[in-house]
């Protein structure tokens, strides 16, 4: 029985060594030169394919001189106000924003800020009326939160000529207001 086991083991060894199954090649294969694998493809840059996001906040400021509309939530008869001072305050603990801007033609204003990440939280920001250039229309009103602080709403460009026509990532546009100053008396 020991002879038959020994003979079986020898037969298996001879069969395995002649087939070349365990070494990957047989004596009849031609040697191929070694070619390294292709280099790995470069990783694409992380979203948003830019170093920072550009955030814009836009709105309009009016002068409400019509005495019939004072105290009413309407801009009927109001005229655009150029030169009004506004302020945006964002209370983000990592990147707070405190900017002032002056309204231009047609009462249009726009704030701009850059951030390195896409996590600008619009609920942390408010826009405030500060000062009117007009003596006739110098009283701040809380119309749309002009005194208490107006929230931001994600939106589309306003039809005013200075407004940007298109916004593609990484540009993000918010709207606020419109705001109104009224007669001092």
Image (cartoon, rainbow, N blue to C red):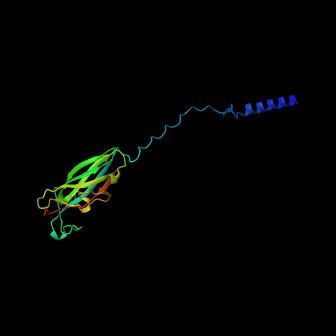
Nearest the eye: 84 or 112: 84
- Which residue is painted at 26% across and 54% down in the image? 127
Give left or right: position of 146 versus 13. left
**Whether residue 113 is situated above or below residue 7 in the rendered picture:** below
Q: Is residue 4 left or right of residue 156?
A: right
Quarter of the image where one finds residue 18: top right
Q: Is residue 178 above or below residue 28?
A: below
Identify the residue at image location x=26%, y=52%. Answer: 88
Can residue 69 be seen here? The reply is yes
107 relative to 35 in the view: left or right: left
**Image location (x, y in percent) of residue 41:** 47, 41
Is 166 or 24 nearer to us in this picture? 166
Question: Can the viewer see residue 166?
Answer: no
**Residue pushed farthest left?**
135
Residue 90 screen position, x and y as percent: 30, 50
Picture mark count: 0
Which residue is located at x 74 percent, y 33 percent? 16
């Amino acid at each position: 029985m020991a002879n038959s086991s020994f003979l079986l083991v020898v037969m298996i060894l001879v069969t395995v060594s002649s087939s070349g199954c365990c070494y990957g090649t047989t004596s009849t294969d031609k040697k191929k030169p070694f070619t390294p694998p292709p280099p790995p493809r470069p990783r694409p840059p992380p979203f948003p394919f830019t170093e920072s996001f550009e955030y814009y906040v836009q709105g309009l400021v009016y002068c409400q001189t019509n005495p019939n509309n004072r105290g009413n939530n309407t801009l009927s008869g109001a005229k655009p106000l150029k030169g009004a001072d506004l302020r945006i305050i964002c209370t983000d603990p990592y990147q707070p924003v405190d900017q002032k801007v002056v309204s231009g033609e047609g009462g249009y204003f726009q704030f701009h800020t850059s951030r390195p990440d896409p996590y600008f939280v619009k609920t942390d920001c408010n826009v405030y009326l500060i000062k009117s250039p007009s003596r006739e229309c110098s009283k701040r009103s809380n119309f749309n939160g002009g005194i208490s602080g107006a929230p931001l709403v994600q939106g589309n460009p306003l039809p005013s000529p200075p407004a940007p026509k298109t916004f593609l990532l990484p540009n993000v546009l918010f709207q606020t207001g419109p705001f109104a100053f009224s007669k001092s008396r």
